[in-house]
Amino acid sequence: MAGILVLAEARRGELRDVSLELITAATELKAKAGGELAVALIDATPERHAARLAAAGVDEVLTVRSPVAQFEPHVSARAVEGLIERLRPTLVLAAHSIDALGFVPAVAATGGRGFLSDVTALGWDDGPVAIRGAYGDKLVAEYDFPGKATTLLLLRAGTFAPAAAGDGGGGARVTEVAIELDGVARTEHGGYREVPAGDVDITKADFLLSIGRGVEEKDNIERFEELARRLGATLSVSRPLVDAGWVPGARQVGQSGKTVKPRVYLALGISGAVQHLAGMRTAETIIAVNTDPEAPIFGVAHYGAVIDMFELADELEQALD
Amino acid sequence: MKVVVPVKQVVVLDDEFELLPDGSGVDPDGIESELNEWDTFSLEAALQLRDAAGDGEVVAITVGDEDAEEGLLAALAKGADRGVRVWHDELQGADALAVARVLAGAVGRESPDLVLCGVQSSDAINSATGIALAGFLSLPHVAVVTGIASDGSALTVERELEGGLVELVRVSLPALLTIQTGINEPRYATLRAIKQARDKPMEVCSPADLGIDSAQLAASIGARRRRLAMPDRGGGAEIIEGSAADVAARIATIVKERMD
C-alpha cells in the first residue's frame, strides 16, 4: 500500500478546475505518503485532458474510458474500484463536488475504507490526517483513519491553489487502463438544462447587497430591494430565499447559483453555509451583518457587525432620507 | 408505492455553547436539536409520491437515542405511516458510513420501492450517508435531486449541478435519491396530527436486532475524530462595534471608499 490516486473530473468535455487543485494537495503530501502520484480521469474521451493532468509532481496519468457520454455514478464507482485494486493507494483524493458525492461514499462504504468529505486541510501523522468543519461549520474537527488500507477524501473546491496544468512536455507516463464498464450504468442521462437567466446579471454588479434567511418573511424582501436600489447596489440572495420561491434563481449566490466577485459584498442575515461562501469569498470587500457572532460568514468577511439586519436597515434608510 | 425516508434529529449549537475542556465534544448545555431541514423535503417528496400512487406507505427511520424520537414523531405528524428508531450506546459518535451501515439493515428489510434521503444534515454536513446507504443496499442512486416525476416503475429526476446547471436523469425502481432543499414546500403538521403521531406504530430496535454485530459496526466507521476546536478565523473580520447608527455610518463609509 502506497501512493496517492487523484480523481480528476470533466463535464461536457471540459476538465473541471478542481482537478488541478487536487493535484496540488496530492503533491504536498506525496513525500510523506510515499509511492507514486497517479491522476485518473474517467470520461468518454479521457485522453483529451491527459496532457494537462500531467502536471509537475504527477508520475502517471491514467485514462479510463467510460462507455457513456456523461458522468454516471455506478460507472465511476466501478472504475474507481478497479483503480484501487490496481494501484492499492494509501490515499484517494477527489473533489467535494456534486459528481463525486454521487458515488465516492458508496465506494468507501462497501469497501470498508477510510472516508471524509468536505476536507479543508490535510496532514500526515503516521497516516493521513484531515480537517473539516463540524456542527454546521461553527467548529473544526481533526480526523485520522486508523487501520484503513485506503482512505478516500473529498476536498472542498477553492481550498488548494490549482497546480499549473501540464503542457505535454512533462515526465508523467500516460496509461490507458482497461476496466470492464459495459452494462454497469444504472441511470440514463436525459440532457441538461440551464437555470433561466433573470432580469439581472448579478455577476456583473460592482456592489451586491445580499440577503439571507435573516429576512424572515417574503414581505420583507421588497424593503431590501428598495434599500439596495437607493444605495446603488444590486440585490442578491442566499439559497433559502430561492428555495422558498420568494426570489428567482438568477439572484442566487453560491455553489448551485452564481459565483460573484463584486468590489463590495454586503451580506445581511446570511450565516455563510459553505455552499454560499463558495460563490462569494473572492469578493474584494466583504461586509457581514448577522446576529450570531459564531456565524461562519465572519470567517471570510473583512468587516463584520453583530447586529440585527432590520436595525441596520432602519439606520441606513434614515441616512439616505 | 412504499417509500422509506431516513431522517435525523440534528444538533443546533446555541449562542453560548462551549467546548468540553478536553476538546472531545461540545458541552451538552449548549445543544438544542431539531429535525434536519433536508429531511423535511425528502419526507414531503415521499408523502406526495405515496399519495399520487394512491397506495403504499411512508416509513421514517432514524438512528439515534431517545431524543431522536422527537424527529421521528415530527415525521409521523406530517404524515409518515410508521417509524423505526435504531439505537445502541455504541453508536455514540458514529460517522456517516457507520450510520449508513445501520440504516442498511433497517431499510433493507423493508424492501422499499424508493428510498429518499436528505442531501445532507445541517450539523454534520457530510453529504455522504445517503449514497453510502445506496452502496450497502446495491440500489441505483442519484444524488442532489431537485425534481421527481414518476411513472410507477421508473423516475425521471432533475439533478442539481454546480453553477445553476441541471441534469435530467432516468432511473428505474427500486432506487435511492438524495433530495435537495427547495424541491417542494414541506407541509406543517396540524396540532391534531401532532397529538395523533404518538398513536402511530413506532418500533425501537438495536443494530444487533438487525443482524449487525459490534465488529461489523466498528469496521464500517470511515473516520475517527481526534480533536474538536474553535475555528481559526485567521485575521478574521474587523468587528464594527457600537450602536446600529454607528455601524450604519461605518458601513456607508467603507462602501463609499471601495466604490470610488
Image (cartoon, coloured by chain):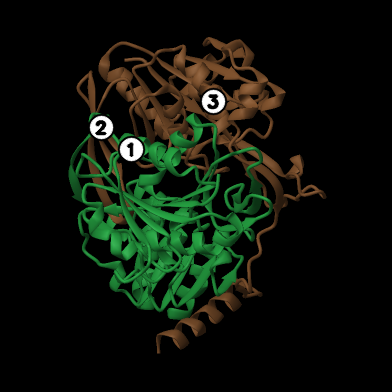
Chain B rendered in what hue? brown
Label 2 belongs to which residue? Answer: A187
Chain A rendered in what hue? green
Name the residue at 49% across, 36% down.
A108
Name the residue at 73% across, 45% down.
B26
Question: SS class of the residue under badge 2?
Answer: strand
Q: Quadrant of the C terminus of chain A?
A: bottom left
Q: Amino acid at mark 2?
A: Thr
Same chain, marks 1 and 2?
A: yes
Q: CA distance from mark 1 to mark 3?
A: 20 Å
Question: SS class of the residue under badge 1?
Answer: helix
Q: CA distance from mark 2 to mark 3?
A: 23 Å
Decide: is A318 above or below B136. below
Q: Amino acid at mark 1?
A: Pro
Percent position (x, y) of residue A187?
25, 32
Percent position (x, y) of residue B43?
42, 27
* Count of number-bearing discs: 3
The chain identifier of the residue carrying mark 1 reads A
Decide: is B217 above or below A180. above
Badges 1 and 2: C-beta atoms under 8 Å apart? yes
Decide: is B59 above or below A154. above
Label 3 belongs to which residue? Answer: B101
Q: Could you say which is closer to the camera, residue B207 or residue B12?
A: B207
Percent position (x, y) of residue B153?
23, 18
Q: Amino acid at mark 3?
A: Arg
